[in-house]
Image (cartoon, helix red, strand yellow):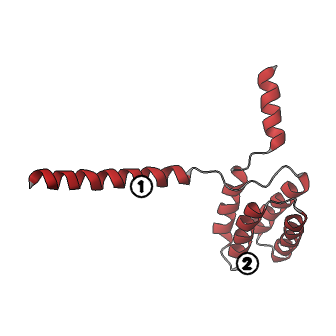
Amino acid sequence: MTIDRNRIVFSVLGIALIAGLALFISSWRLPAQIGSDEAVFETIDALFTAVNSRDKRQLGECERRLRAYRESGKLPAAAAKQVESIIEQARSGQWEPAARRLYDFMLGQRRASLARHSVSHELS
């Protein structure tokens, strides 16, 4: 009976450890990437300013431009979805949490020009 109980306990602990590890790894995943279009990057930067200054007019302008970039294919759909969620959060009055999410989103971007610079610098 003790052997069966120990086997069950270790099985449950093992499953919990694997689930915890998977959750930890998924939390370090990069956000969806905005791509390398400079106009999109500048609009995301302007969005950050709008959210931090709680400027509804500028928020709407950034939203309009980002929607146009998404429709033209300059802003990938996954990134557009994340940014739209942040915009909605700000619009609902949750400016500070939206600013934190947008800041994290921006930090997670891997710009192609930065990557090229790093590679060329390493080769020199």
In the rendered image, which quarter contains the C terminus?
Answer: top right
Q: Nearer the viewer, residue 27 or 62?
A: 27
**Residue 120 vertical placement versus 104 (above, below):** above
The residue depicted at 15 percent of the width and 54 percent of the height is 4
Q: Position of residue 99 (x, y in %)?
A: 69, 64
Q: CA distance from mark 2 to mark 1?
A: 35 Å
Q: Nearer the viewer, residue 84 or 21?
A: 21
User: Label 1, on which residue?
Assistant: 19
The residue depicted at 63 percent of the width and 67 percent of the height is 97
Q: Position of residue 83 (x, y in %)?
A: 74, 66
Which image quadrant for residue 71? bottom right
The residue depicted at 80 percent of the width and 67 percent of the height is 50
Kindly identify which numbered label has been placed on residue 81: none
Q: Position of residue 104 (x, y in %)?
A: 66, 55
What amino acid type is highlighted by mark number 2?
Arg
Tally the numbered discs. 2
Look at the numbered disc 2 and give the secondary structure of its residue: helix
Residue lying farthest to the bottom in this orientation:
92
In the rendered image, which quarter contains the N terminus?
Answer: bottom left
What amino acid type is highlighted by mark number 1?
Ala
Residue lying farthest to the top in this orientation:
124
Q: Position of residue 120 (x, y in %)?
A: 82, 27
Q: Nearer the viewer, residue 78 or 101?
A: 78
User: Label 2, on which residue?
Assistant: 91
**First reached walking from the N terminus: tag 2 or tag 1:** 1
**Residue 5 vertical placement versus 55 (above, below):** above
**Residue 36 vertical placement versus 115 (above, below):** below
